[in-house]
């Protein structure tokens, strides 16, 4: 419940988003109601039935256009079924035409509202009563699903949008003869609602709701018209509260409770039922996916039942349906990311060998791909989910286009702020491709020796020898020098430094070292025993012995053991007389007196 509330708080910022339903989900969740009533108008609820009033088999008139004009459409016939609009109606601008229709319909004056529509695609035998039914259906759909942006709707006869300037001078531009005012999804396609400027014969040009929009009224109403409960409710249940019938508010609250309980039940059943499975991976994945599955099932249930049983209307409905669509996308994204994360983790833990054995090069390479790939796939899933949210709503599309097209200060600031993050992301891709470091590699970074424990999306974790964790940005790894002791091979040679007196028999020490090395199981026998005098000082000589092992950890332990044994051997050789010494020359008293005299 807390997760759901948090999402709704986040979604409250999207109240201004256009509520036209998204194409990729609506095919599943919008179901057409069956035609119930035989009458054209339901007198009890004052809304038309879903029965078509237009007979498509009736005779249709021709719809010829006159010569092209960029400012309006020339038509040779117009609304022969009901006659031309009376001159008392203001249809001079797109906004005026739509205002006339909405205001007349809201006041129940549908005989006036019908003159805002273009019926040129309707049958010639259509009556005024049929036109009134169409007007009622269109008003219901607009009130139900369309959020008209009145500010962007032109109030000029030429259809241009006014732009404020400091000089208040008109800005040159082309006149428009077709203006968009809404969009609704229908059967997998977007039905665009428009008003168009027409000119009939010698009459002046005026604006009407387009003939194509009128032609789509019947199928739109069949999909988005009143539900069964709308017709079944008594009159007292339709008393408005905050502009919404009381029964719809009560029904919505009940559905919220049911959706919450269904989500909780899904989580409970997912964990309890699969907990008894013999396959441990089924138990684990059920535990991982229980919460996102519960959120998804609960949200889908609420969306489907709300749309098919109650069907909210008005501006609040736009916000609710938009929020539910976004919440569905978020829950699907959460579910998929959990699935990807679990799958990658399962492969890493059960299908890859032991990376602690550093000679297992292929295992470490595969684990590196999985470690980086898991983050990349998760990131892509989140981006795709965000894209679906943005691409389905016209308002967000405009915001996205504006941000991409703008070169303003805000864009520059965002670019600078995201520079390090983007640099680390691309560094992760570069590491996955070029593989300068892999999971399990032994490295020295910032003068600390350790092994790479994890490669994240923007950082890697190094486990040092004393069990500390260094979190290193990937950009730093790409840009700076570091040592990778197992980049091409885990095999390693370690030096053993010992200081001894000048008089020591080096060949005897060399033979002893060879014997000691051959007796150690950790020696990989790839490199022969070597002991050399590499330096001399005024006090001693410097002996360097070389030992090799299969990996860095083993080589380190081996060279520590051999150093201890070599020091012990030299200290015991002839009672330790070959240990490094500091020599002092002491003169006798007689010699000192001679020097002074």
Image: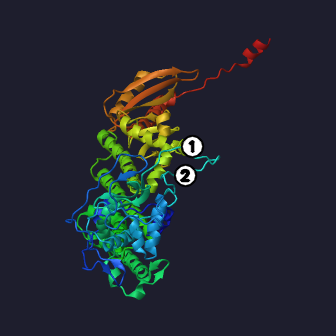
Q: Are marks 2 and 1 in contact (CB under 8 Å)?
A: no
Question: Which quadrant: the N terminus?
Answer: bottom left
Number of numbered discs: 2
Side of 63 relative to 464 (left or right): left
Q: Examine the rendering and report whether any part of residue 1 can be seen.
A: no
Q: Is residue 259 left or right of residue 500?
A: left
Q: The C terminus lies in which quarter of the figure?
A: top right
For this orientation, the residue located farthest to the front is: 202
Kind of element beneath mark 1: loop
Q: Position of residue 362 (x, y in %)?
A: 29, 40
Note whether residue 392 is visible: yes
Closer to the camera in the image, 309 or 542: 309
Q: Is residue 412 above or below residue 346?
A: above
Q: Residue lying furthest left in this view?
A: 57
Q: Going by the picture, which residue comes out furthest to the right?
A: 597
Q: Residues within 10 Å of mark 2 (few under 14, many from 20)?
A: few
User: Which quadrant of the figure has residue 246?
Assistant: bottom left
Q: How is the image coloured?
A: rainbow
Quadrant location of residue 226? bottom left
Please name whichever residue, 131 or 301, is drawn nearer the observer in this view of the structure: 131
* Residue at the spot of label 2: 162
Percent of width and height locating residue 74? 37, 51
* x then y, percent, for residue 176: 44, 50
Q: Nearer the viewer, residue 176 or 31?
A: 176
Q: CA distance from mark 2 to mark 1?
A: 23 Å
Residue 69 point in image, percent of width and height = 40, 46
State whether residue 148 is above or below residue 482: below
Q: Secondary structure at mark 2?
A: loop
Residue bearing the label numbered 1: 408
Q: For residue 133, which numbered disc appears in the image? A: none
């Amino acid at each position: 419940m807390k997760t759901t509330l948090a999402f709704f708080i986040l979604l409250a910022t999207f109240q201004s988003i256009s509520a036209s339903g998204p194409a990729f989900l609506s095919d599943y969740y919008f179901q057409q109601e069956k035609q119930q009533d035989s009458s054209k108008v339901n007198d009890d609820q004052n809304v038309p039935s879903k029965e078509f009033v237009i007979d498509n088999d009736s005779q249709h008139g021709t719809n010829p256009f006159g010569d092209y004009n960029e400012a309006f459409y020339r038509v040779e016939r117009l609304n022969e079924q009901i006659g031309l609009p009376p001159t008392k109606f203001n249809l001079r601008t797109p906004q005026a035409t739509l205002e006339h229709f909405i205001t007349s319909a809201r006041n129940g004056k549908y005989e006036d509202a019908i003159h805002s529509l273009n019926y040129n695609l309707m049958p010639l035998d259509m009556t005024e009563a049929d036109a009134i039914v169409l007007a009622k259906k269109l008003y219901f759909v607009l009130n139900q699903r369309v959020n008209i942006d009145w500010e962007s709707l032109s109030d000029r006869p030429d259809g241009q949008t006014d732009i404020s300037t400091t000089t208040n001078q008109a800005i040159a531009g082309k006149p428009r003869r077709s203006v968009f005012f809404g969009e609704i999804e229908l059967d997998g396609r977007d039905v665009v609602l428009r008003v168009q400027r027409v000119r009939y014969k010698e009459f002046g040009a005026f604006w009407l709701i387009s003939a194509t929009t009128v032609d789509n009224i019947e199928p739109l109403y069949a999909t988005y018209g009143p539900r069964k409960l709308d017709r079944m409710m008594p009159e007292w249940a339709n008393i408005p509260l905050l502009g919404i019938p009381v029964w719809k508010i009560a029904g919505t609250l009940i559905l919220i409770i049911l959706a919450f309980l269904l989500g909780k039940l899904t989580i409970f059943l997912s964990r309890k039922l699969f907990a008894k499975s013999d396959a441990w991976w089924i138990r684990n994945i059920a535990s991982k996916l229980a919460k996102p599955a519960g959120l998804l099932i609960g949200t889908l249930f609420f969306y489907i039942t709300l749309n098919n049983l109650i069907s909210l209307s008005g501006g609040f409905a736009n916000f609710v349906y938009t929020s539910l669509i976004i919440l569905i996308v978020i829950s699907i994204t959460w579910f998929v990311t959990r699935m990807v994360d679990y799958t990658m983790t399962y492969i890493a833990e059960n299908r890859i060998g032991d990376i602690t054995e550093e000679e297992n090069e292929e295992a470490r390479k595969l684990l590196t791909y999985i470690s980086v790939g898991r983050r990349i796939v998760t990131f892509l899933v989140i981006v795709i989910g965000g894209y679906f949210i943005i691409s389905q709503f016209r308002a967000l599309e405009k915001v996205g286009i504006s941000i991409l097209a703008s070169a303003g200060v805000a864009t520059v600031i965002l670019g600078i702020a995201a520079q390090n993050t983007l640099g680390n992301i691309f560094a992760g891709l570069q590491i996955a491709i070029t593989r300068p470091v892999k999971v399990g590699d032994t490295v020295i970074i910032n003068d600390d020796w350790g092994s790479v424990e994890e490669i994240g999306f923007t950082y890697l974790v190094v486990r040092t020898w004393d069990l500390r964790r260094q979190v290193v940005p990937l950009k730093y790894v790409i840009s700076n020098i570091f040592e990778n002791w197992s980049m091409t091979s885990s095999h390693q040679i370690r030096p053993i430094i010992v200081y001894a007196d000048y008089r020591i028999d080096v060949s005897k020490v060399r033979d002893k070292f060879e014997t000691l090395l051959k007796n150690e199981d950790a020696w990989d026998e790839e490199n022969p025993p070597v002991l050399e005098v590499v330096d001399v000082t005024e006090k001693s000589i410097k002996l360097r012995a070389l030992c090799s092992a299969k990996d860095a950890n083993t080589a380190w332990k081996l060279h520590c053991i051999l150093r201890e044994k070599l020091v012990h051997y030299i200290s015991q050789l002839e009672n330790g007389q070959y240990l490094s010494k500091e020599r002092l020359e002491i003169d006798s008293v007689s010699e000192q007196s001679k020097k002074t005299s």
